[in-house]
Amino acid sequence: MINAAKSTEAIAYLAVALSGRTAAVTLRALSCAALSAAMLSHQPTTAAALTIELKDVAPDRIERQRQAARGALPLPGTPEVGETASRLQKLDLTEGTPVLIRIFKEESQLELWMQKGERYVLFATYPICHWSGTLGPKLVEGDKQAPEGFYTVTRRQMHRSGRWPRSLNLGFPNVYDRSMMRTGSYILVHGGCTSVGCFAMTNPVIAEVFGLVQNALKAGQVHVPVHVFPYRMTHANLEKHQNSEWANFWRNLKTGYDSFETTRLPPAVSVCNGKYSIRDGRPTEVGLSSSPLAVCGQTAQILDAEEQLQSIVSRPSRWSTLTDREQRLLGLLKAPPSQILRRRQEAIARASSITSVGKPGRGTDRASPSVSVQCNLRLASCRRHLALKQKRATRSIAEKTRKQQRRQSAKLRR
């Protein structure tokens, strides 16, 4: 069913007709990687489109996109990425040593740390050119939200082709996300300055980050930790956000933040009972564990029944007819299915408030509405079904919009 974004799109197109400007609202229920693929195949006229985000956090993202669209790079605060070797030498670091990445959404910053002796030291802090959404975790495919949590990058997650030939796949959803019934795919750290759910760093910056991560993995680091936080996890910031619905989740993330701040070593992270469990890291195990996120028995049961649980959560009509076994499975979840579904719906509705505008005179992508499907979005068949529904909904909205524009034009001529 098409959500309230439908009327918003119609209003936006009507505004275009009245003003003569080439602006339109773009409401997408696509993952970051899916959006990139669509841009390649569709060849839209808005290569320099700017995304107007929710204004509750990091408003500098908008200005950074404008700077990138004008070619005003590097962004302020960007290290001399063309001088990587000399900067490494100045800190007595060498390529190939283990690395760790930390991302802070509210500050729009990415830190890259490198091992030096038995501790990690900060090599560089880069401005994030763009990330989409707001503070809080990613909940569902299509919510345009950048995730939060503890992720890892392995050699298999290094992308060397496609729209972003140098990019890091964070591996969302990780086992914690999956145990919380969260869905999505292909969340990347990539180049450029446009993104839906990913972190866009500009091409020169991602070239340096990608190279350092790649060399570390080639030298024997099994996985690179990537810690994504809503903000720098200070007591003052937690206090500022204490009334958020995600306050408890953020306090949980803070345990991992504090561990690294204290030890300057990546913590050992596991998942149990809907929480991350943190143990201080040891110098001898840095980046060498073959299982970056261990799970307890309860979480393992959820993961084993994930597809069945996703089906139950997505279909409220089944809730009153569950078998005893299905009820026991639902009892393993941290939240009831009604709360999970409600949060998903709220996330999709929030995503519909994001709009895109192109440069004057250049046109924009055709609107793609948010739609809902009752299937598991982790399955390729479900994602194809979603894409087909979006295509049909887009055509329907476009036709209705054209009719509204014709009626409005007729009124203006009278």
Image: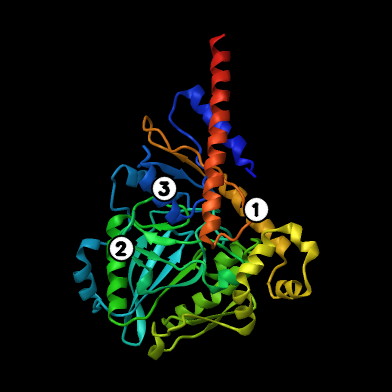
**Of label 2 and label 1, which has the lower sequence position?**
2
Q: Nearer the viewer, residue 195 or 370?
A: 370
Q: Secondary structure at mark 2?
A: loop
Residue 60 in percent (x, y) is at 43, 50
Q: Secondary structure at mark 3?
A: helix
- Crowding at mark 2 (Cα within 10 Å: few <14, some 14-19, many 20+): few
Look at the picture and state if 179 lies above or below 60: below
Give the foreground label among 3 and 1: 3
Front: mark 2 or 1: 2
Q: Residue furthest bottom?
A: 284
Q: Residue furthest top?
A: 414
Q: CA distance from mark 3 to mark 2?
A: 18 Å
Q: Count residues near mark 3 (Cα–Cα under 10 Å), then give few for <14, some for 14-19, many for 20+.
A: few
Amino acid on which the number 3 mark rests in the picture: Ala
Instruction: Of the two numbered discs 3 and 2 on the same chain, state the one appearing first in sequence.
Output: 3
Name the residue tied to disc 1: 345
At which x and y percent is residue 51?
Answer: 45, 44
- Amino acid type assigned to the residue bearing label 2 in the image: Arg
In this figure, which residue is indicated by the disc labeled 3? 38
**Other residues around mark 1 within 10 Å, as few (<14) / some (14–19) / many (≥20):** some
Disc 2, disc 1: CB below 8 Å? Answer: no
Q: How far apart are the two marked residues, 2 and 1, measured between alpha carbons? A: 34 Å
Q: Earlier in the sequence, mark 3 or mark 1?
A: 3
- Circle 1: residue type: Gln
Disc 2 target residue: 160
Relative to 15, residue 243 above or below: below
Quick one: which residue is furthest to the right in this view?
Answer: 320
Please provide percent x and percent y for residue 300: 60, 80
80 left or right, relative to 176:
left
Residue appearing at x 24%, y 78% in the figure: 94
